[in-house]
Each structure stands twice: as structure tokens, then as C-alpha cells.
Amino acid sequence: MKKKLLFILVALGLFGSKLFSQSGEITVLDTVMLSDEKLVKFSTGQHVARLSDSLLRFNNPLLTEVLNFNTPIYFKENGLGMVSSPSFRGTSASQTAVIWNGININSQFNGQIDFNTVNSGAYDQIAVRGGGGSVVYGTGAIGGSIHLNNTLSFKKQQDHRLLLRYGSFNTLDARYNFKTARKKWSLNLAVSRNSSDNDYDYPNDRSKNLNGAFYNNSANIALGYRFNAQNTIKLISELYDGERHFSLIRPSENRTKYIDRSYRNLLEWNSEFSNFTQITRFAFIQEEYQYYGNIESDNFTFGKAHSYIGKYDLAYEASKDILLNAVIQNTYTKGEGSSIAENDRNIFSAAILMKHALTDKFQYEMGLRKEATDNYDSPLLYSLGANYEFSDFYSLQFNASRNFRIPTYNDLYWASSGNPELKPETSDQAEIGNIFSIATFEWGLTFFYNQIENMIRWVPGADGVWRPGNEDKVKIYGIESYISWQKKLVKDQILSASVNYAYNVSENDKSNRQLIYVPFHKLNGNITYQISRFTPSIQFLYNGKVFTRTDHSDQLDGYFLTNLGLSYAMDKQRNWQLGGKVNNLFNKEYQNVENRWMPGVNFNIYLNFKF
């Protein structure tokens, strides 16, 4: 019965065969298609930051560095290239949702994504949205969401891009992208390889980063076909294969390694008829890992999960000012591991959304979502957002929502420790945003508040065994701010600048203490100055102090990093570029996690070709 629900959802989409091109924000926008159209349509009252292609090329391909230097998200990183987990608006790693082409891909085992296993070169667009999003995107969208999107264009083109980068510690970054399209079909292909010996010296001759080598490979293909102006089908597939040797704290420790692979596949049918738009999706996602406690041994522990997702999305444009949307989804997951017996769960969800442009200056949206499953009791989720443009200079935003995070496979089914009685974590939050704009200058200032209940924590029982329970309440409040500016000074000279700042207070309701590894302050920025074919640039990052013990008995000091870059366009069209970058210019000694030193000054050079 559970599996039949998936096929019923997919079959619903086969009855709509005519497409009608609607006005406003609709899935088929001229010749470009985006699977995650909800990011465009239903983010009223929230700030969405989109990262540019040039920014992605300038940074290390691993998503941690891209986001660390360009967003207000804090990352706890167990050494360069090692396990990396986010804290978005003071929340935990499993309270940030990662959305792949509209599908939530947070791990079934621990509820989070390791951002050093995501290669940014595989995507056409990366976007970041702060604040709650569970009504649209489901579990984990409490602090915010990261969106990894592949787009398809049906405009005639053929485009090759090749990026080759080599740097300190024998680090290699190679990316190839190919796009070709005609009026009826479109094909995108992306392959990448990232590897490093990662054997940097610790500061003050403390030692060397031992057993830190890693590599990862990824391949991504997106294929679309337009039957006519009303019907389009597309397939997106992604493969990731990675291996990391986990860095040692002491040379006497066992050398370990971790292998992880993921397979993601999405089949999507878009059709429109009259004032209706329907999107039918079927996705298959597999994640698996192997952990070797000693790389000299063939013994390992493992985990593997398969998810089958059917999703039907029906939108109705009631008028040019009102958009109604209903979404139903069924997710069936089967998982097992060395410490988890084979278990499955089925989750059915339904959501209704409405967006109304009341006037040219004021628009609002509302949404409700409810899930049904045998594994836990799901709360009714809601969202409400509004924008009001007082003038060309000032706009006011508001958003409020209830969000949640479901218990993971580890929480529910871990051998002799899992707790099948766990409740989902719930979050009630609100934010007010202010946007000030003058020409190409924009300043955003957002105040937010978040109350999280039933937070899941693993705590020791009377028998000494650690078990998960709904233990904590957390109160979070703070500020997010950004500045972006660009100015053409004279011919062939453009100055650009962007700055992000976050202030987060994230307190345990019982102890009134800041959560561990959540800094009060984070600041970053980028400045570029294009002078004819030369483009010098500078990046900076400040992370404030973090506590490493719940009783605040120990802490890591804050640190300030500076990166310096320079690129040169070898032709007038800027299709051939040579560049380089100095990371940690002033050789700052710092730790991001206790006893995990990060590298000092290091370098890389790159060639970027478009042909």
C-alpha cells in the first residue's frame, strides 16, 4: 500500500497535457527551467542570497568554503576538508535543510549534510534562504535552507567550460561543464575531481596534519525535452564518490578513513492547462557510507538508505494577483546499517499555499502543511510572509512560521539505544527585515527570534548507555545584515563589494548558556576591482569565540582571516582567464574545532576556459 501511493502520485501528473504560459513567476520562464520554483514564488518576507558564477570559481570547490566566506552561516570544521557542519541562525547542523532541485536531501541517518562532501561545481545556481521553510521543504528547515539547483535553457547554445586549479598540499581541482541546447531539447553535463594530500604543517612546529588526505568525484547530468509549448519533461541525475582519511590529533592514534557515496535521480514532468500548472516528480535517492576504524584492516561499519519520493504540485492562477498552490508528497525510505537493523518508514504530506499581490507595493503569502506517518506525531505547520515597498528606497518584510525536524534513523533505531517514542523538534519563529536601496547599493537588516522545543539530545541513562530524548528547549534571537554595492568608475573599471554580518544568541532554556560551537559574531566580505583585464580581489572572515563545553569551562578564541586574489583575462571576451589566490594571507594560527588546527598561509593558481 505504501509503495502504491508513490505511483498514484506520479500518475496524477499524466492527465494534464496542455500547457498554458502564465504571467508572473511560473515554472517555464521563457526558455529557462528551474526545478525549485518554490524558492522564487514562496519566499515572501525572507531574504534569498544567490551566489554568482564568478564567486563559485574564485573559491575552493567544497561548499564549506564557498558559504563560509559569502554567507552568515558558521561552520564547525574538523580540519581542512574534514567533517563540516553548519550553524545557521544559532541552530544545530541538522536544523539546516539542503534542497537539491526542490528535494530535501538531508541524511536519513543523522539528519544533516556534511558540506565538505558537496562540490559546488556540479550546480548552475546555489542560493541561501534564512529562516523557516518546513511548510515548503519539510524536515530540518529551521535555521534556514541551502538550495543546489540545475537549470535547463532551451535557447540555442553550445558551451564548454574547463577549470583547472592546483595549490598547496598537492591540492587539485578540475571541473568540466558542457551545455548544449536547441528549441526542443537541452543537455547539461558537469564532472569534477577534487583531491589533496592535505599534509599542512601545524603552527609553531606543533606537528603536521597526519592522515588528512581526501578525494571526491562528482558527475551531474540534466536532460530536458519540450514536446510543445505546454509540456516538458526532464531528468536530473547526480553521482558522488568520496574518500577521506580522518586527521589525527596524536600520531599514536589509529589511522581511519571514511567512504561515502550518493546517487540522486529526479524525473519531472511540467504541464499547464488553462490557468493551472502541474508538476509531477519522482525521485530516487541513495546514500551509503563505510567507516574503517583502521585503514590497515578490511573491517568496516556501514549504513545505507534508499528513498523513493513521489510529489504532485498543482498551482492555479486565480487572477493576475492571486496564486494558489497545493502539494502532496509521499516518501518511502528503507535503511539499514551495522548498528541499525533494517527498517522502513513512510511519510505522506500535504501542503496548501497562497500568494496575493494586494497592490503593486504590498504582497503576502500563507501556507499550511501536515504530515502523516506511523513513526511519530507530526505538528501542523504554518507560514505567513509579507513585503511592503514604502518607496524605491525602503522596503519592509515580515515572516512567521512553525517548523520541525523529524527524528533520524540513528535516533529511532540505533541498536539497544534508539528511542522509537521520540517527538519531532518544533520551532516557532518570526523575523522582520528592512531593505534600503539606492541605485546599485543595497543594505539589508533582519531581526529574528526562534523558540525550539523538544530538541533531541543523546544523554547517558542510569545504566551508563547513551540514548536520545526530547530534552531541551532553546531560545534564539539575533541580527543578520548584508551590504552589496557595485560601481562603474570609469571605462573598464568596476568596483564591487559585499559584506555579511550575523549576531546570534542561542541559549539553552535551562542553563541560559550559549550553545557550544555557536559564535555570537560572524563577519565576512568580498571586494573586487576590475581594471580592464585585471581583477584583484580580497576576502575577509571573522568568527567570534565559541564555547566548547556546555558549562562554558573552555572556549576557542575568535580569529580574522584574509585571502588575496588576482585574475587576468587573456582575451577581450574574458573567455580565457589566469588567476591565483593566497589564503590566510597573514598566516593566522587558529582552530575551528578544539585540537584541530587549520592551515596557515597557502596558495593556488587556476586556469579558466570558456569555448
Image: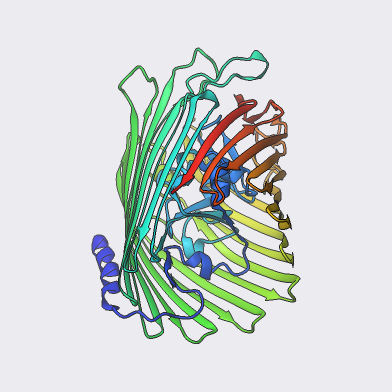
Look at the picture and state if 498 lies above or below 225. Answer: above
Relative image position of residue 394 (x, y in whole percent)? 75, 70
Q: Quadrant of residue 27?
A: bottom left
The percent position of residue 159, horizontal first and vertical second, equals: 41, 53
Number of numbered labels in the structure image: 0
* Residue located at (65% from left, 33% from top): 549
Q: Is residue 129 above or below residue 192?
A: below
Of the pair 68 and 227, the residue shown nearer to us: 227
Q: Quadrant location of residue 275?
A: bottom left
Residue at the image point whose x is 26% and y is 78% from the top: 15
Which color mode does the image show?
Answer: rainbow
The answer to whether 472 appears left or right of 1 in the picture is right
Left or right: residue 74 versus residue 611 is right
Q: Residue 1: image x %, image y %?
A: 23, 63
Q: Is residue 220 above or below residue 22?
A: above
* Residue 11 visible, this orientation: yes
Q: Residue 6 sits in which quadrant?
A: bottom left
Task: Compare residues 319 and 121 and report the one nearer the observer.
Answer: 121
- Could you tell me if residue 379 is visible in this image? no
List x then y, in percent, for residue 63.
52, 43
| In this rendering, position of residue 473 left or right of residue 391 | left
Q: Nearer the viewer, residue 408 or 25?
A: 25
